[in-house]
Amino acid sequence: MTVRTALLQGQQLLESAGIGVPRLTAEVLLMRATGHDRAWLYAHGDDDLIEVWWIHYGRYLHQRIGGEPTQYVTGRQEFYGREFRVTPDVLIPRPETEHLIEAARTRAPESILDIGTGSGAIAVTLALDTKAHVTATDVSFAALRIAQQNGQRLGGRVALVACDLGAALADESFDMVVSNPPYIAGRDGKSLPPEVRDYEPPIALFGGQDGLAVYRRLIPEAARLLRAGGWLMMELGDSVAVREMCAGWMSVEIVNDLAGIPRVLVAQKP
């Protein structure tokens, strides 16, 4: 079987299974199987697939058709122009979270705390793109191992701490606290796409029955950990409810994405 035929057959199988963007998915899976980029696939369309490539490609197609997210099949996800390792132990980084990075970069903090770091995408990116000293926490040891691997591979120096929110940071203070907390309401879980609901870690998705449980704890925790005048930046679910929780903070602002959807809350500690 040639590379071109393998792409076509993979696309057809994915399309028949109702998988979105079947051509692109087939390309990504075949790139992973062969270890080559997209340009190589098209430049070598008439080349025969060697047996080990075909075995891996077939397995990847089977996993994706079964519902497993492409990112978990390949173990990779791009975020802010860099490739991060991901596993089912961590939430898959989304493009929407890049708005949080943009907001954080404009303040030029000297020290940043990322609460609930997961894959480390936010913390490692800020460590690489700012001069700040970055600390990151997570309650999951498995997630922290992935964050550590991403930091080491990409060269982003991050101090990792295992704890709930910032509980282990009793004597430290920061110029900025950032977080992408779990904000999906538990009552909405059944409406999620199966590849999200059935594969991504529930602890990183659900914020209690109303989606606000972590915000209720995170906002006062950030107030404790921030220096006077420090900044809190959080990705949003319910922007109105979270903004109301920030009563008493200064310069509370909601940052929308290009479609006008509220994505990030920014607030300054008095």
Image (tube, rainbow, N blue to C red):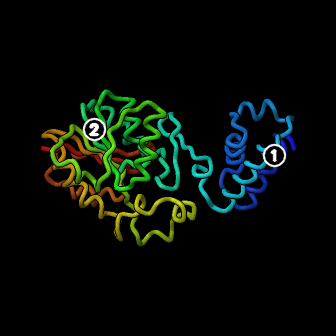
Q: Give the residue drawn at x 78%, y 54%.
A: 12
Instruction: Identify whether 251 is placed above or below 206.
Output: above
Badge 1: few (under 14), some or many (20 or more) residues near its Cα, within 10 Å?
many
User: Mark 2 is on which residue type?
Assistant: Ile
Q: Position of residue 118 (x, y in %)?
A: 41, 49
Q: In the picture, which quadrant includes the N terminus? A: top right
Task: Name the foreground residue: 15 vs 10.
Answer: 10
Q: Give the residue drawn at x 76%, y 35%.
A: 41
Query: At numbered mark 1, what does the secondary structure look like: helix, strand or loop?
Result: helix
Q: Give the residue drawn at x 28%, y 32%.
A: 133
Query: At numbered mark 2, what does the secondary structure look like: helix, strand or loop?
Result: strand
Q: Give the residue drawn at x 33%, y 43%.
A: 160
Q: Is residue 242 visible?
A: yes
Looking at the rendering, which quadrant does residue 77 occupy?
top right
Q: Earlier in the sequence, mark 2 or mark 1?
A: 1
Q: Which residue is mark 2?
A: 112
Residue 6 marker:
1
Whether residues under marks 2 and 1 lie with C-beta atoms below 8 angstroms apart, the answer is no
| Distance CA(mark 2)–CA(mark 1) | 46 Å
Q: Position of residue 99 (x, y in %)?
A: 40, 41
Q: In the picture, which quadrant includes the C terminus? A: top left
Looking at the rendering, which quadrant does residue 219 occupy?
bottom left
Badge 2: few (under 14), some or many (20 or more) residues near its Cα, within 10 Å?
many
Left or right of residue 73: residue 34: right
Q: Position of residue 119 (x, y in %)?
A: 44, 46
User: Mark 1 is on which residue type?
Assistant: Ala
